Each structure stands twice: as structure tokens, then as C-alpha cells.
Amino acid sequence: MNIEFLTNDYLLAWNLLFKPSFSEEVQNLKEKLWQNYPKQYMKLEKENIEILKYNDDFIPDDDTIYTYVFDTEVFKKLKKETDKHRRFLMKFWDEHQKKINEELKNIIRFPIKDTYHILVIHPSLDTVEFMGSNPKRNISWGKLNDKEDGQKALMRIIYTLVKYEIGSHQKENREIVAAIIDLAITNELHTKIAGISKYNEGFKNLRLLKRQLYPYWLMYLGAEKEELVSYMMRDQIAFDFEKYPIEKELKKVDLYGFIDFCCKNQKYIIRLDKIDLV
């Protein structure tokens, strides 16, 4: 897997115009443009789709508003900070790329050959957008909490890329799929990269579901019965392992196979009303 971190002035300007204002200065700019160019403003409403689709090849039908925005001090400042944020994210990727690819291959067990283009947006805009049918693999990315921890930001990006790869697989069981990708990337991959357990991380609404999947997840990772205790100690997640017969075939499947196993057997795996709190 390869990731390129890029910026696109049109995409940055579009998000500035259509995402919630994060400062009075931004709000004033939007109001001024709306008063002076209402028709042109309205026509841009869905243009982010075209920008994401074509990236560098995008040419607006009417660049009146874009030209105006590019010349403002608020945009120039935003672009400078966005370029800095791009370098911040790229630094963590460059430092950990080799290890991430090695560990990711071991965890998901299927190749990601394509290059993904992360079109970095200012984190204050707090947005992620991607198109499932986009052959160029362009993803708009700028999350507010990325500034807190570059490594964690990278895990969120990789989670999104794997989610992109999985696509509509088992779409009728989206919550299970999301929980498994969270286990794979937010928890296991991050644990491998950080060197300490990250199983306390992830989506809060998936926490109980992941707790139910966890014993089978360890079997997928290849843990033998005598190794389960060390994993539980590592991750501070306890369960009565004597109640779980080892599913030896799980360590031979890829992430798709594990998803299929959990979806097929969800009636006896997922019983949130009787969760084991050891």
C-alpha cells in the first residue's frame, strides 16, 4: 500500500465555503460572497464531487468565486497551515511506512496494491470524504483531532482506506464489519506500531460488540489456547477462555473470511445482553 499526501486549492476553497464556519472571519467571507454572487455560489454546492474525482485535472466551469477566495488573506493563511499539516501527516507516514505495510499485510492478509491520494484539508474543517467508485482513490481528509497525535491520525486514515477496500462486502452487517476493521487497524495495527496495547482505542459505540468478537479475533490472529491469557493481559480484556473452543481455521483466512465467519455465526457470537464481564 502506498499513500500520497497532497493538497488541492479548489477542494480547500470548496470546504471553506460549504463546511461550518470555524471563525468569524470565515463566516464574514461566506456572507459577502453570498450577497455578491448568489447564483455562482449555489452552482458550486456539489462541485466537491468533481474535484475529488479529477483532482489535478479539475477545471471549474466558472472560477469567479474561486479566484476571489484564492486572493483573500483568510484563504492564504488556511493554505499555509494546510501545507504544514500535510507535512505533519506525511512525516509520520514516511517514518512508519515500511513497518505499517509489513504488519498490515499480516493482519488483513490481502494485498492493497493501489496508491491512495489523501487530499489534505485544514483540520479545523473537520471533514472526511471519499467516493467508493473513484478509480483514482482520492480521499479528502482533515480531522480536528489529527493535530493531537500524528500516529493516531495515521491509524484513522488507514482505517478509512481499509474500509474503502472492503467496500460493500457484507453490507447488511455494517456494524460487524466496522467493528472488525476497528479491531484490525485502530487496535491491532496501532498496537504493533506503538509497541503498547491500543485496545482501549476505537469507536465507543462499537466497544461492546468488539468485546464479543475479541476471543475469535485472537483466534484469527493465530493465538493458541495457552496464549490467550497473555493476550488478555496485554490488552486488559478478560474473558473465560475455557468457554471458547479454538476455531483453528480462522488463522488461515483473510480479513474477508473472518468477517464472513462472524456474520455467519453472529447469533451465538454476539449476545450483548449476556456479555462476559470477567
Image: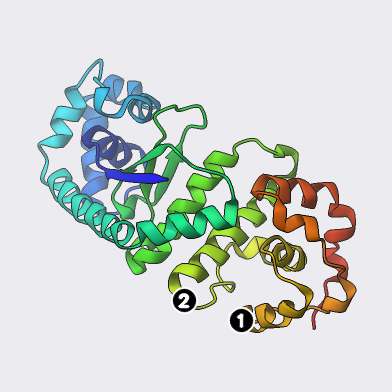
Dot 1 crowding, Cα within 10 Å, few <14, some 14–19, many 20+:
some
Residue type marked 1: Arg
Q: Is residue 160 above or below residue 55?
A: below
Chosen colour scheme: rainbow
Which residue occupies the extreme top position in the image? Answer: 61
Q: What residue lies at 52% left-to-right and 53% top-to-bottom? A: 105
On the image, the x and y values in percent for residue 136 come to: 39, 29
Q: Earlier in the sequence, mark 1 or mark 2?
A: 2
* Residue 144 visible, this orientation: no
Which element type, helix, strand or loop, lies under badge 1?
A: helix
Q: Quadrant of residue 153?
A: bottom left
Task: Please name whichever residue, 128 or 217, is drawn nearer the observer in this view of the structure.
Answer: 217
Residue type at mark 2?
Gly
Q: Secondary structure at mark 2?
A: loop
Q: Quadrant of the N terminus?
A: top left
Q: Is residue 184 left or right of residue 55?
A: right
- In the image, what residue occupies the spot 42% across and 65% down? 152
Q: Is residue 183 left or right of residue 42?
A: right
Instruction: Tell whether 196 sits left or right of 108.
Output: left
Rendering quarter of residue 155: bottom left
- Name the residue that disc number 1 marks: 234
User: Residue at the location (71% across, 58% down)?
Assistant: 251
Is residue 108 at all visible to an observer of this figure? Answer: yes
Q: Nearer the viewer, residue 173 or 128?
A: 173
Image location (x, y in percent) of residue 131: 48, 32
Q: Residues within 10 Å of mark 2 (few under 14, many from 20)?
A: few
The span from disc 1 to disc 2 (Cα, nearest Å) is 11 Å
Q: Where residue 276 sits: x, y (%)?
A: 83, 76
Q: Please give the label number shown on residue 38.
A: none
Camera-side residue of 220 and 75: 220
Tag of residue 195:
2
